[in-house]
Image (cartoon, rainbow, N blue to C red):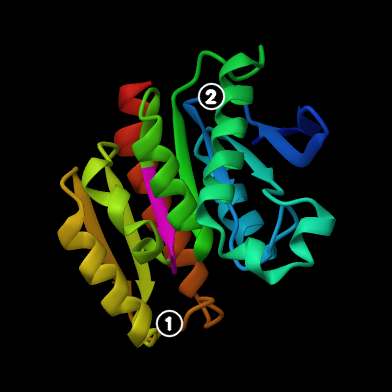
Amino acid sequence: MTAPLEHTVKITKENLALEGILSLPTDLRGVVVFAHGSGSGRLSPRNSFVARHLQRKGFATLLLDLLTEEEAEDRRNVFDIDLLADRLLLAKAWVEADPLTRNLGIGYFGASTGAAAALQAAAREPSNIKAVVSRGGRPDLAESYLPSVIAPTLLIVGGHDEPVIEMNQTAYRLLTCEKQLVIVPEATHLFEELGALEQVAEHAGRWFVRYLESSS
């Protein structure tokens, strides 16, 4: 398989500039925008691993810093879901305008607090959002938006991540869209166990193939 074309991009608005990495495989099925959590960013090794798996399935990926370096130093911003969702919607607008991606359906992949941002963004601006995947997410932080999400949503949680399992079970009941909750056996919050992240990538890939490609 030919390696995806990788572009360093900058998404700007007024005095704001967010850095990202756009990867474009051949025969594109859609584009997945990643919403990182807990102060992580475009260089997150776990999300990069999932992104490479999705690229092999024909999806473009946008790994993006939702916060500037200065903003990320203030831990309060990591839990400012409104701010993170605003930034994700800025990225959505950029994807819809850029010549390389503007004709593609969009999916969100959110991790930790980024999952709450993805779900809020999907509820606020549902147009062209075909699927959402949450990895070890905190969907409870977007609780009031969950009944408004219409994009098919997959929640993935580690089997040993007990508090987050409960949060996702509650969120699952509030979602009214096509949905699935997957618990990866023996996995903890960061899916660091042998083979755990591979399972996350496989589940996410199947979800996006099912809903993102078929709707784009």
| Residue 2 can be seen in this image | no
From the image, tell me which residue sits under label 1: 187
Foreground label between 1 and 2: 1
Tag 2: residue type?
A: Leu
Q: Which image quadrant: the N terminus?
A: top right
Residue span colored magenta: 132-137
Quick check: is 43 in the magenta stretch?
Answer: no
**The residue tagged with tag 2: helix, strand or loop?**
loop
Does 119 sit above or below residue 69?
Answer: above
| Residue 66 can be seen in this image | yes
From the image, tell me which residue sits under label 2: 28
Residue 197: % across, % down: 51, 68
How many marks can you see?
2
Question: Which quarter of the picture shows residue 47?
Answer: bottom right
**40 vs 87, nearest the viewer:** 87
Tell me the crowding category of disc 1: few under 14, some 14 to 19, or many 20 or more residues within 10 angstroms, Cα based. Answer: many
Question: Which quarter of the picture shows residue 14?
Answer: top right
**150 vs 216, nearest the viewer:** 150
Question: Which quarter of the picture shows residue 22?
Answer: top right
Name the residue: 40% across, 51% down. Answer: 133
Name the residue: 33% across, 45% down. Answer: 207
Residue 141: % across, % down: 40, 63
Name the residue: 48% across, 27% down. Answer: 30
